[in-house]
Image: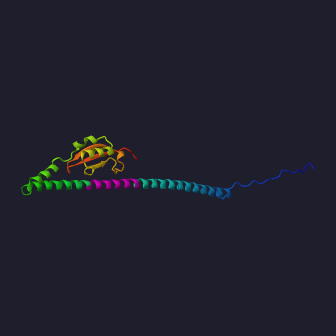
Amino acid sequence: MDDTQVDWTKRIDTPAPASDSAPQPDAHASSQDERLARAERSLKRSKIALGVLAGVLVVAICAVTVVAFAAYQKLGELAASYAVLEQRADKAEQRAEASAGAAAGAGSWGSSDAAASDSEDAEPLRAADLTGIINQKWSNALRMLEAYGVDPNDLIIVTDDGGSVIDPGNWTVTMVTDIDDTGGVAVYLHHDIDWF
């Protein structure tokens, strides 16, 4: 038995290394998961960008609406001011025609009518007559105008914000000027309550 030798070692075949071209099931599944995760991240980013864009669009629409509304109000107030100026011009033209007609017809109608029309046009209202109302609340200035015998409807009211005067106690007279084109007087008011 000396010549016989038994090999007790067991031979284990090691698997051959996989080639790169052979598909591996785990690698394929993980690449699909990766692609799916990337698609989900891309979708989330797109949703966020779309939400931000929608928010910016809403803000822009609101801003345009506010600006358009303010411009519409200003146009309305300018149209009203223009109508007042046209009325003033018409009144001035009528006064000029009346005084010219009175001067031409003084011989036939007598001197009393000419004197009456001259007394009406002799002292037109000027801004210098109303300097006492400057820096007064408009409510107080209205009382002063009444004491002066001036009708506030004969004045052109210009507000600093273009708004209408609803509560005279919230406005202050800042300036009084003559308007040479129409012969009227403009009163400038400052709104004491700032809304913006």
The answer to whether 46 appears left or right of 164 in the picture is right
Query: Horizontal and vertical percent for residue 42?
Result: 55, 55
Q: Is residue 138 magenta?
A: no
For the view shown, which residue lies furthest in the right direction?
1
Q: Is residue 80 above or below residue 147?
A: below
The answer to whether 52 appears left or right of 19 in the picture is left
Nearer to me, 13 or 32? 32
Kindly identify the residue that appears in the image at 29 percent across and 49 percent down. 157
Q: Quadrant of residue 138?
A: top left
Nearer to me, 67 or 115? 115
Kindly identify the residue that appears in the image at 13 percent across and 50 percent down. 118
Nearer to me, 80 or 170? 170
Label count reads 0
Kindly identify the residue that appears in the image at 24 percent across and 43 percent down. 130
Give, as a single range, the part of the protein colored magenta: 65-83
Kindly identify the residue that appears in the image at 38 percent across and 55 percent down. 69
Q: Is residue 75 magenta?
A: yes
